[in-house]
Image (spheres, coloured by chain):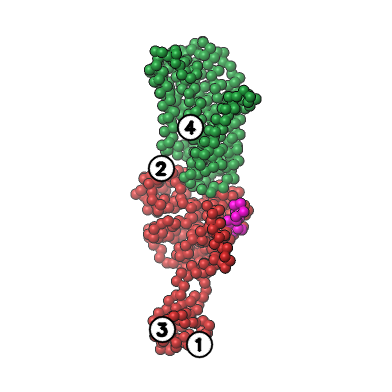
Amino acid sequence: MNTLSTPIGERPASHPAAEQPVVLATHELTKSFGSTLAVDHLSLSVRRGDIFGFLGPNGAGKTTTIRMIVGLIYPTSGYAEVLDHQVPRDKEAALRHIGGFVEVPAFYGNMSARRNLRLMGSLNGKIEEARIDEVLDVVGLRERADSKVGDYSHGMKQRLGIANALINKPELVILDEPTSGLDPQGMKDVRELVRELGAGGTTVFLSSHLLNEVEQVCNRAAIIDKGRVVVEGPVSELRPEHQAVKVLTSDQARAREVIAAFLGADQVRLDEEYLIVESSDGTVRELVKQLVAAEIGVDAIIPAHEQGLEDYFLGLTQSSDVDASRASNATEGASR
Amino acid sequence: MRLLRLELTKLFAQRRSYVGWAALLAVPLLMTLALYLNRNNAHHDNGPGGMISLAMHNGLLMPIAAITLLSGFLLPLLASMVGSYQLAGEAETGTIKTWLMHSISRGGVIVSKWGVAVIYVAIGLAIVAAGAFVAGALAFGLHAPTLLSGQTVNVGQGLWLTLLSYLYVLAGVICVLSLALLFATFTNSSLTAAIAALVVVIVMNILGAFSYFDFLKPYLFTSRVDAWQSLFSQPVEWSPILKGVLVFAVYTVALLVAAWLKFRRKDILV
């Protein structure tokens, strides 16, 4: 597997997203189980070539939404649309363009990986042996292709799930937490794989509860909580605009004066040995120049929020109401 | 048809399929062995049913004797298991969701799963017939069979009557597997669905056993299963056979439609 090392946030705009056609859209998609609302009027759209992160804490309604998109469950109201085919009304046509898995990929344990792929692939049309070899190569399972899937490790099943998602060359690949339960190397492999898919022009809809994963892999994302979209947009814009940096200098008192004069007194404060500076894009560079001009030695400048989106995300989803965690637990129970 | 072919691929890949068939095959072999070893005082100990005494000295009638023994319990059991496993078994392993995430209709899935269960039972019956025929021929030879009513018909006619009775029993067993398939749309446990179908069969048998419930009897498919035996009296009385076929068909269609209605909009949450 070769590596695409550029983080997506800084990726050149190879996908002029707005001009690409919509591959997947959900329109006011809603699902309730009894009195529990698992997905609540959820609308989003994914354009061709997007690697779309579908981000939310466990129990936010991610899997329930995916199940509705692929026609495994029926929405209480609303619908999904895949390349102009409405789901559930026209789901057979829609599913011709979708590959993927929901939760843990499930296969026939008494058959080899190759037979599973042949069997599943045949459901959407004719499948050639060469294609089976090809997808097995992509996920690195070629050597184990003839072992029974029942003997596979969790990570291998996960990779087989991706192979199966690709077998019919679908336009839209839906992966539900593809790195869950994998070791760090496995996670890295799967993320690289997803990036390569995107680079190859496949539209990927990736659900995840891991923010750094979405930051690393996706160009667009929606953050959902309690079945609703909280934010949707390019991953780079999901970051908070103003980011704090921690500054350590040879003379903190004078440095504080310099920064206060430059940015305003309310933009800087002393926290233990560091100065915390609220900065926006480009200000850090200017700041350093000013400090150097004032003959203050700069020892370190560190981003104060190393998690980036993580903090932002927590702020969005852990609202002040105390029932939040209880409500999300209830939703999780219902979506299982 | 493509769905049915793919379902067959899965059926033949499962070891349990062969175990079921082996269990079926064991019955005619054991039965023939018992009759053969006991052949000298056979007139006193014929085992259950008149058919078995007919088969006593004629391998040609051994398939008929075998089906008499099987239609009571083992066949309904296997039919329940294969019918329920088709859907609920795949819910247990989660593979049903992988299966349904393809461009196939829910109706097609139900029909193909029903079809593969029918094929399974049909193959099972063919194995029983072949096993009984070979074992019976080796033990007792093949003779022109004597019927229940006392006449003797030629070998060809005997084989023809045997084939008809097997097809009739198959139609009856299809009711059981359709019932199991219907129950499998309500539960994700194949064992639960299989047992539920068997319970219904047993309850129907009990109802059929009491004269108080005689008014129900024409509508119970279980009470119709033994009607094939009238094929073995000359002249053949066709009316119970035809009525039986009608009852089986009505049950099967109704159960399949019910299974489809339930499965069509079912939320797959496994």
* CA distance separating discs 1 and 3: 16 Å
* CA distance separating discs 3 and 2: 64 Å
Q: Residue at x 46, y 51 (%)?
A: A104
Closer to viewer: mark 3 or mark 2: 3
Q: Which mark is residue A261?
A: 1
Chain B's colour is green
**Near-viewer residue (A177 or A98):** A177
| Label 1–label 2 contact, CB within 8 A | no
Q: Residues within 10 Å of mark 3 (few under 14, many from 20)?
A: some
| Label 3–label 2 contact, CB within 8 A | no
Residue type at mark 3: give it: Thr
**Which chain does the residue under circle 3 lie in?**
A
What residue sits right under mark 4 in the picture? B78
What residue sits right under mark 3 in the picture? A249
**Which chain does the residue under circle 2 lie in?**
A
Q: Helix, strand, or loop for circle 2?
A: loop
Q: Is residue B220 in view?
A: yes
Q: Residue at x 45, y 16 (%)?
A: B46
> Where are the magenta residues, as a range?
A30-42
Give x and y (percent) for residue B244. Answer: 59, 24
Q: Residues within 10 Å of mark 1 (few under 14, many from 20)?
A: few
**Near-viewer residue (B57 or A295):** B57
